[in-house]
Amino acid sequence: MSADHAEIDPDVNQDEWPFPSEKFLHEWAPGVLQAQNAWMASIDSLRAPDRKTHELIRMVCTVIARQPGGVQRHARLAAEVGATWDEIAGSILLTEPAFGIVLAIQALPAARRGFKQGMSGSTRGDGGESLGV
């Protein structure tokens, strides 16, 4: 279930549960949620690629999966660890030859929102805020 499914259940508190599926798994299958969290922690602990590349790859996967919530989240996380808007937009545009321009264009607004969120919480001071995004 994607983050976009919050529309299905307006009672899902996004502050408590980053993904609506976590609330449901917690209620219905807590063992599955624990196993999923352990598995994700293992993926997050990979030593390579570096964290910025890791987030860009995961963002591109969510572009391909047509998950704008995931695009926004991973664009934010990528920006928080140093990705520029050019790196985020360029990574999305790399999906175009295999998956078409429509997916790339549809993903850019969510990526832009995530980038802005990541920059607003960032103290990098590399001028990313002046990119006009």
Image: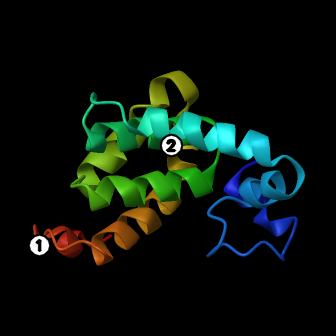
From the viewer's perspective, is the residue at label 1 or at label 2 nearer? 1
Residue 61 % position (x, y)? 53, 35
Residue 100 placement: quadrant: top right
Residue 27 % position (x, y)? 86, 58
What secondary structure is found at the residue carrying circle 2? helix
Q: Earlier in the sequence, mark 1 or mark 2?
A: 2
Nearer to the camera, 14 or 95 = 14
Nearer to the camera, 36 or 31 = 31
Residue 131 % position (x, y)? 22, 69
Count of numbered circles on the image: 2
Q: Is residue 94 above or below residue 8?
A: above
In the picture, measured across the screen, residue 120 lies left or right of residue 76, that is left
The residue wearing badge 1 is 125
Coloration of the structure image: rainbow
Please name the residue shown 22% across and 74% down the image. Answer: 129
Spatial CA span between label 1 and label 2 = 28 Å
Please name the residue shown 30% across and 58% down the image. Answer: 79
Judged from this view, the residue extending furthest toward the left is 126
What secondary structure is found at the residue carrying circle 1? loop
Q: Is residue 30 above or below residue 128?
A: above
The residue wearing badge 2 is 104
The amino acid type of the residue labelled 1 equals Gly
Residue 23 placement: quadrant: bottom right
Q: Where does the C terminus fall, quadrant-wise? A: bottom left
Nearer to the camera, 133 or 33 = 33
In the picture, measured across the screen, residue 4 lies left or right of residue 106, that is right
